[in-house]
Image: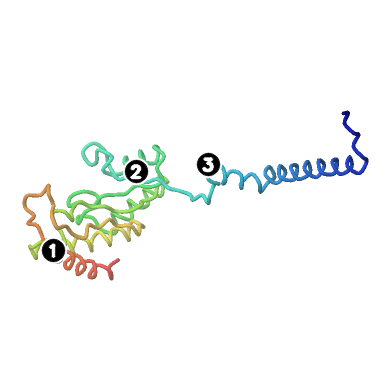
Amino acid sequence: MSELPASRETEGLSRRAVLGTALAAAGTAATMHGPWGLASAAQAAPGAAAPAGKRYAMKKSINQWAFPYPDKMSIEQCLKLAKSAGFDGIELNYDLDNDLSPKSGTKEYTAIRQMADKIGIQISGICSFLFWPYPFTSHDPAKRARALELAGLIANAAHDLGTENVLVVPGAVHIPWRTDYEPVANDLCLSRAKEAIGKLIPAA
């Protein structure tokens, strides 16, 4: 038996159905590939990279211990090399004998700050190893007092050098590389550290 030809009504309905399906597909494609659709598709796709978020300007700083100071380089050479290497700042170190030490004062620190400004590098902070031989948490009251004294001098140096950042080691329960440090109990260490930092806050 031969197939009967479709009626005009059936034919029109079929065409409308096909057209509607095509339009729906086109709309979906437009949504997926439009300016907002791409982000949605990327989020939905497994393994797709997340949309780029807010970007922050980052600055690079290097510690002065990266240079052979003071044996082979002066502080000026350190500043210049750090600048030429692409660093925005340098963290200087406070000790007992060199440019940043109890031997220096406002005059010397101001000169270093002006030198850094001329070179075009920022003094990002001050660091010191002195809080290991003179811990705030030592059993020796004289060492604890010396730690507070040094911290005050470092705070003054930071002010003169134009930096607000100072690395302070508040204390230690145990210092494995020092044979002259007697371990301190956790609660006593915490108590002494809090007391010391509390005394330093006004100077900061």
| Numbered mark located on residue 16 in the image | none
56 to 191, vertically: above or below: above
Q: For the residue marked with disc 2, what is the amino acid?
A: Leu
The answer to which quarter of the image holds residue 196 is bottom left
26 horizontally vs 124: left or right:
right
Residue 89 location (% of width, % of height):
38, 47
Quarter occupied by the N terminus: top right
**Colour pattern:** rainbow
Q: Which residue is mark 1?
A: 144
194 to 90, vertically: above or below: below
Determine the secondary structure under disc 2. Answer: helix
Residue 70 location (% of width, % of height):
22, 41
The answer to which quarter of the image holds residue 142 is bottom left
For label 2, the crowd category at 10 Å Cα-Cα, with few meaning under 14, some 14 to 19 and many 20 or more, is many
Q: For the residue marked with disc 1, what is the amino acid?
A: Arg
Determine the secondary structure under disc 3. Answer: loop
Q: For the residue marked with disc 3, what is the amino acid?
A: Pro
First-in-chain label (3 vs 2): 3
The CA distance from mark 1 to mark 2 is: 33 Å
Residue 141 location (% of width, % of height):
9, 65
The CA distance from mark 1 to mark 3 is: 58 Å
Q: Which residue is mark 2?
A: 79
| Numbered mark located on residue 46 in the image | 3
Are the residues at dot 1 and dot 2 in contact (C-beta closer than 8 Å)? Answer: no
Q: Give the residue displayed 88% in from the left and 42% down from the top.
A: 10
